[in-house]
Amino acid sequence: MRLIIGLIILSFFCFSCNSNDSKTTNSTKSTSQPKNTKTTKSLIQVDQLLSNEGYINIPLNIVDQTTKDGYLVNRVQAMYKDDPLELLVSLKENVPAGFVDGMPKNTFLVEGIIFESTGPKSDRLLTTLAQKYQINSGKLTMKSKQVFTCANFNKTPIDYKSGNPKFKIFLEGGGEVAELYVNFDFKKSLVYLNEKDPQYRDGVIKLLGE
């Protein structure tokens, strides 16, 4: 836990420009309730994405949203050639600003973001991410559920309808550590998995997988 806290504090002094998304073509409810179903003409083709100044950033289409247990649950999808990819990315509701008057506040967002596998489509997403990272891993299996502490980089409270909040999640386990930006663009119905640093690629794949 000390390591996570140290990484979060350091993140506010080393906020990489890659947290910005690359250009590519509130009440809490105790049970799941339909919030908004997104319509998407075509899903992003991940295999056609190029690196952004050496970083591999993966945008995913939000195709459905629900609220559950104090979280906005985003079902995100994309395609890799003919294979569908999918993940549930949940963001805690009622998140306050992370910076107030230019100073860090509400720095720690404990259990702020949750990744949940939906099965084979999520496994393919992890395998695709490894391929984009140029990691020879074979087929992978994503962990069923992971809850992340986040660095909150936002200057205003989160707008869950048309905002574009940005976070950094911290992954840790088995002596391995990694960081990954998770950014939302609710106006465009996108979630981005953006690299913090290419040196974390192996760690991201190992820690997201079983």
Image: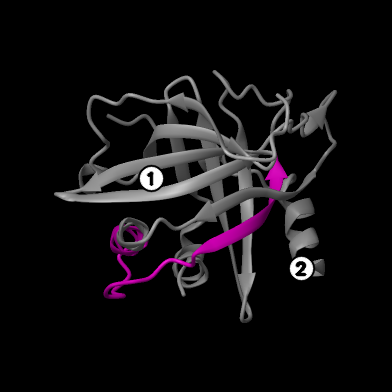
SS at circle 2: helix
Q: Nearer the viewer, residue 83 or 166?
A: 83
Q: Is residue 24 left or right of residue 208?
A: left
Which residue lies at the image location 79% right of the left edge and 61% below the top edge? 6
Determine crowd level at label 2: few under 14, some 14-19, many 20+ residues with C-alpha closer than 10 A: few
Q: Where are the magenta residues, as a range?
A: 126-152
Give percent across and percent down for residue 8.
74, 53
Q: What residue is rendered at 47% in x and 47% in y?
A: 88
Residue 98 % position (x, y): 77, 34
Q: Which residue is mark 1?
A: 58
Looking at the rendered structure, the secondary structure element under dot 1 is strand
Relative vertical location of residue 83 with respect to residue 208 in this rendering, above or below: above
Number of other residues with Cα within 10 Å of mark 1, as a class: few under 14, some 14 to 19, many 20 or more: many
> The N terminus appears in which quarter of the rendering?
bottom right
- In the rendered view, does 5 fall on the left or right side of 203? right
- Of the residues under marks 2 and 1, which one precedes in the sequence? 2
Judged left or right of residue 26, residue 138 is left
Image vertical order of residue 199 relative to residue 34, above or below: below
Residue 193 image point, x, y percent: 46, 46
Whether residue 62 sits left or right of residue 112 in the image: it is left
Gap between marks 2 and 1, in whole Å? 27 Å
Tell me the residue that label 2 is attached to.
3
Residue at point 35%, 63% (across, down): 123
Q: Nearer the viewer, residue 22 or 126?
A: 126
**Is 151 colored magenta in this rendering?**
yes
Type of the residue with mark 2:
Leu
Q: Nearer the viewer, residue 64 or 106?
A: 64
Residue most extreme to the left: 82
| Vertical arrangement, residue 48 with respect to residue 96, above or below | below
* Residue 17 locus on image (x, y percent): 55, 39
Quarter holding residue 173:
bottom right
